[in-house]
Image: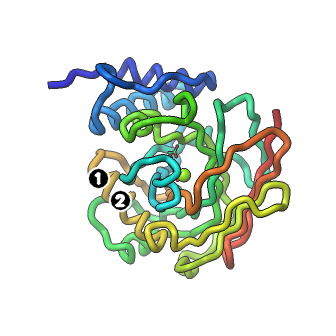
């Protein structure tokens, strides 16, 4: 039986996130399995809650081929979102608060009731109050953004910040919407909502299943990020990032030093 000090590693990774310090991956005798990784994630979240942060939702990871290929992994994962990670639409982030942040275009769901367990995408959509364009700022705490699946899960799936645009009706068609993420007005990544598991509602259903498997709550009022539709792009000071999702609208933010 593998014994992993999930509490110690959770606090270690929380500290790396809080101080924007890169740490080595866990390799060899330090490595742990996926179950331990989710327990470590939980320990790091507990530290955030202790500091007064509040859970506001969940993010799904590796729900598109582009993301899996970029990071060299092939399983869906989840992470927790807190109020401290939420950046105002049109607001700004500071490079100094991150190790090596990247941004990716996403779709956000707002739940009007809790979801959990095995649901069809349609059943999951029935619990949705609103949908919106979203940008996720991910920041691996691991050196060179290199990690195993267990490493990244323990690091709260690289969650660090996110921006959500104006909420749209829940019956908005999400089938095959063009998504253009721009840096200073120039297209940086172009994709489609269909890149997210064929339809973002599938990611929401997967979130309900993962939450159930990992003993997490997806309450009414929660935000769920469906996962990057394209590979993520590195951020730098001075950039203005915007996302247009066809028919849903825009969101954006600026990056300062
Ligand atoms: C892990 C987070 C993945 C997504 O949308 O696929 C993710 C990472 O790429 O560092 O947020
Ligand atoms: Mg993401």
Residue under numbered circle 2:
208
Q: Residue shown at 54%/25% (left/top)?
A: 51
Q: Residues within 10 Å of mark 1 (few under 14, many from 20)?
A: some
Judged from the image, the secondary structure of the residue bearing numbered disc 2 is helix
- Find residue 65 and name its label: none
**Percent x, y of residue 233:** 66, 49
Please tell me whether mark 1 sits on a helix, a strand or a loop: helix
Relative vertical location of residue 75 with respect to residue 159 in this rendering, above or below = below
Q: Specify whether tag 1 is near ligand 1 (CB below 8 Å).
A: no
Would you say residue 96 is visible in this rendering? yes
Can you tell which quarter of the image residue 42 is in?
Answer: top left
Image coordinates for residue 75, horizontal then vertical, percent: 36, 52
Which quadrant is the N terminus positioned in?
A: top left
Mark 2 closeness class: few <14, some 14–19, many ≥20 residues within 10 Å: many
Left or right of 102, for residue 24: left
- Identified at 47% across, 44% down, the residue is 80
Q: Position of residue 235 (x, y in %)?
A: 72, 43
What coloring was used for the rendering? rainbow
Residue furthest out toward the left:
1
Q: Does the CB distance between marks 1 and 2 fall below 8 Å? A: yes
Location of residue 257 by image quarter? top right
The residue lying toward the viewer, choosing from 215 and 1, is 1
Classify residue 97 by image quadrant.
top right
The Cα atoms of the two marked residues, 1 and 2, are separated by: 6 Å
Q: Is residue 225 visible?
A: no
Front residue of 217 and 181: 181
Q: Along the line of sight, which residue is nearer the eye, 17 or 231?
A: 231
Vertical arrangement, residue 102 with respect to residue 230, above or below:
above
Mark 1 sits on what residue? 212
Q: Is residue 230 left or right of residue 155?
A: right
């Amino acid at each position: 039986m593998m014994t992993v000090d999930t509490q110690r590693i959770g606090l270690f990774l929380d500290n790396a996130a809080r101080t924007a310090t890169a740490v080595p991956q866990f390799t060899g005798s330090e490595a742990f399995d996926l179950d331990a990784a989710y327990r470590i994630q939980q320990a790091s979240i507990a530290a955030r809650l202790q500091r007064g942060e509040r859970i506001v939702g969940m993010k799904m990871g590796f729900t598109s081929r582009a993301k899996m290929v970029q990071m060299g992994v092939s399983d869906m994962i989840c992470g927790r979102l807190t109020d401290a990670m939420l950046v105002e639409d049109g607001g700004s982030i500071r490079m100094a608060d991150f190790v090596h942040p990247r941004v990716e275009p996403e779709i956000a769901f707002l739940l009007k009731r809790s979801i959990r367990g095995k649901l069809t995408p349609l059943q999951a959509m029935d619990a949705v109050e609103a949908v919106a364009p979203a940008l996720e700022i991910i920041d691996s705490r691991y050196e060179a953004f290199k990690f195993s699946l267990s490493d990244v899960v323990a690091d709260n799936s690289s969650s660090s910040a996110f921006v959500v645009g104006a909420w749209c009706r829940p019956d908005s068609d999400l089938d095959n919407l063009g998504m253009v993420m721009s840096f200073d007005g120039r297209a940086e990544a172009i994709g489609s909502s269909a890149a997210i598991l064929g339809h973002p509602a599938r990611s929401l259903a997967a979130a309900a299943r993962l939450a159930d498997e990992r003993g997490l709550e997806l309450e009414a009022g929660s935000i769920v990020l469906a996962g990057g539709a394209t590979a993520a792009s590195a951020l730098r000071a001075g950039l203005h990032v915007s996302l247009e999702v066809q028919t849903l609208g825009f969101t954006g933010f600026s990056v300062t030093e």
